[in-house]
Amino acid sequence: MNVNEFLDDLRDRVDGELVNPVEIEEAAVFPDQFYVERRTWKRIRDVVAVVADLKGSTNFSYNRRPEATARIYEAATGNMARTIERFEPDFVDIQGDGLFGLFHGHRRYQRAMCAAITLKSFGIQALEAALDDHFGVDAPDTGIKVGMASGTIIVKNVGVRGTNEPVWAGRPVNYATKCAQAADKQELIITPQVWEHFADNHWVAYSCGCSEENTTPSELWDPITVEKLPEGAADCRRLRTGIAWCSTHGDQFCQAILDGLRLRKSVVAAAA
């Protein structure tokens, strides 16, 4: 292996990549394939990214047998992928103990929000409870953290043919990842740009009210600053710990969001 010659060749390639022009093509619909040889990137506007991650997975994986760790990953990551697929993302990629999904096209914000809340609910209602049942006092302190962001991305396959993967350049995945990192388990954090789409949506912003003493719907989201995000994007919103789809009204709320509904009589009446 002549590593120095190889590095010299890479330096020449880097110089060439930085000098030679690239082409940006607008993508009206989400592309199903990406270029390899051509120096052409696809630009996709107003994409919604959902990132889900396991809290503390690095720590618990070192403290138990490989078989137990593998079972936890199968139970967590595999079912996270099944969960997000229910809401028809345009792209999903599993990365380590987490994943990200990209939503574009018709009702992308609604599908992404329902996927994010369902991922959060899966962690609360299924994953954590099952880990406690199977491992008892040795259950890992873990759970699902979710982040959500939107914006424009550019994409292209890079690498050697046969091993090439798409690179998603832009804010959505980056910002959603930082939101997920800032979240604790059982939390969903969304950027201001996403919140703009749901601040006046009664099905997202307010509870069903069935667990409140006076059955009056209450606000579900708290303001939170994500320090790793730049000014203008750091003033996010957090769906608090423990909040999941209601066992009584969850189906109704999820379908209403997917159908694009915004107003609820009970919320309008409470505000009057």
Image (cartoon, helix red, strand yellow):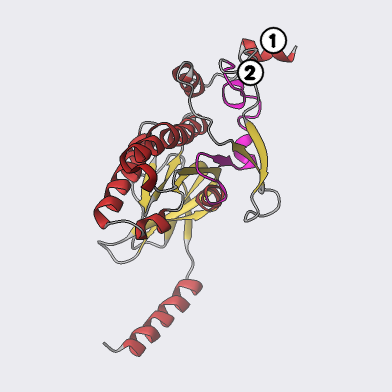
Residue 108, compared with residue 170, is above or below; it is above
Labels 1, 2: front one = 2
| In-image side of 144 versus 65 (left or right) | right
User: Residue 202 magenta-drawn?
Assistant: yes
**Residue 69: image x %, image y %?**
30, 52
Mark 2: give few (<14), some (14-19) or many (20+) Cα within 10 Å.
Answer: many
| In-image side of 91 versus 245 (left or right) | left
Residue drawn at the location 41% of the way across and 58% of the way down: 58
Say what amino acid the circle numbered 1 marks: Ala
Identify the residue position indicated by label 2 in the image.
217
Give the spatial CA distance, label 1 vs label 2.
10 Å
Q: Secondary structure at mark 2?
A: loop
| In-image side of 227 versus 73 (left or right) | right
Say what amino acid the circle numbered 2 marks: Pro
Per the rendering, the mark at residue 215 is none
Using the rendered image of the protein, determine whether residue 50 is visible from the camera's viewpoint: no
Residue 196, compared with residue 26, is above or below; it is above
Magenta segment = 181-209
Determine the residue located farthest toward the right in the rendered image: 272
Q: Out of 210 and 117, give the one closest to the viewer.
A: 210
Picture quarter with the C terminus = top right
First-in-chain label (1 vs 2): 2
**Residue 148: image x %, image y %?**
53, 42
Identify the residue position indicated by label 1 in the image.
269
Total labels drawn? 2
Residue drawn at the location 36% of the way across and 60% of the way down: 62
Residue drawn at the location 54% of the way across and 40% of the way down: 187
Q: Secondary structure at mark 1?
A: helix
Residue drawn at the location 63% of the way across and 11% of the way down: 266
| In-image side of 166 versus 152 (left or right) | left
Using the rendered image of the protein, determine whether residue 132 is visible from the camera's viewpoint: yes
